[in-house]
Amino acid sequence: MQFDIHMIGFDEMLAAAPSRPGAYALRQHDGLRFGRFRGDSDIVYIGCAVGPGGMKRRIQTYLAGSATGTTERVIAASAHYASFGEFEVAWVECADAEAARSLERGLLRRYELHHGEFPPLNRHG
């Protein structure tokens, strides 16, 4: 599996983002890492984009500042991690919504096995 990592400006990131479903990771830019229960990580959130507009629309909701639900919670909580540096988005485009959800679950499971907990902005589901 190959992640497309985007450390470019927001306008360029939106232009590059696919309008298809996908799974993504919100990460600390420049390799900044923080301690976890086991080890350390640069990933603060793992999610998926399955609605109309795919990854492009999902990234827009983070940038628009008018989010609700999970997106609102992630934006609010990310202020703490933003003090450590900028974020980048890494994504994998998927064939359909089910593939995106399945990939997200797999990434969360792998993260939890490695670190003993979910990324800090994910809730344990």
Image: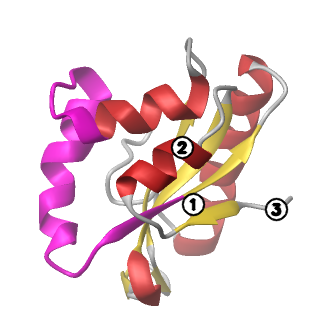
Q: In the picture shown, does residue 98 fall above or below 119?
A: above
Asked which secondary structure carries label 1, the reply is: helix
Q: Say which label, 3 or 2, has the lower sequence index.
A: 3
* Residue 22 included in the magenta stretch of the image: no
Q: Say which label, 2 or 1, has the lower sequence index.
A: 2
Report the residue marked by disc 3. Answer: 2
Segment tinted magenta in the rendering? 63-89
At horizontal 60% and vertical 48% (from top left) the residue drawn is 16
- What's the distance in space between the residues labelled 1 and 3, CA to CA? 20 Å
Can residue 46 be seen in this snapshot? Answer: no
The crowding category of the residue bearing disc 2, from other C-alpha atoms within 10 Å (few below 14, some 14 to 19, many at least 20), is: few
Can residue 4 be seen in this snapshot? Answer: yes
Q: In the picture shown, does residue 84 fall above or below 88?
A: below
At horizontal 72% and vertical 48% (from top left) the residue drawn is 92
Find residue 75 and name its label: none
* Residue 74 included in the magenta stretch of the image: yes
- What's the distance in space between the residues labelled 3 and 2, CA to CA? 19 Å
Q: In the picture shown, does residue 53 fall above or below 56?
A: above
Q: In the picture shown, does residue 25 fall above or below 113?
A: above
Report the residue marked by disc 2. Answer: 15
Q: Is residue 123 left or right of residue 54?
A: left
Find residue 112 and name its label: 1
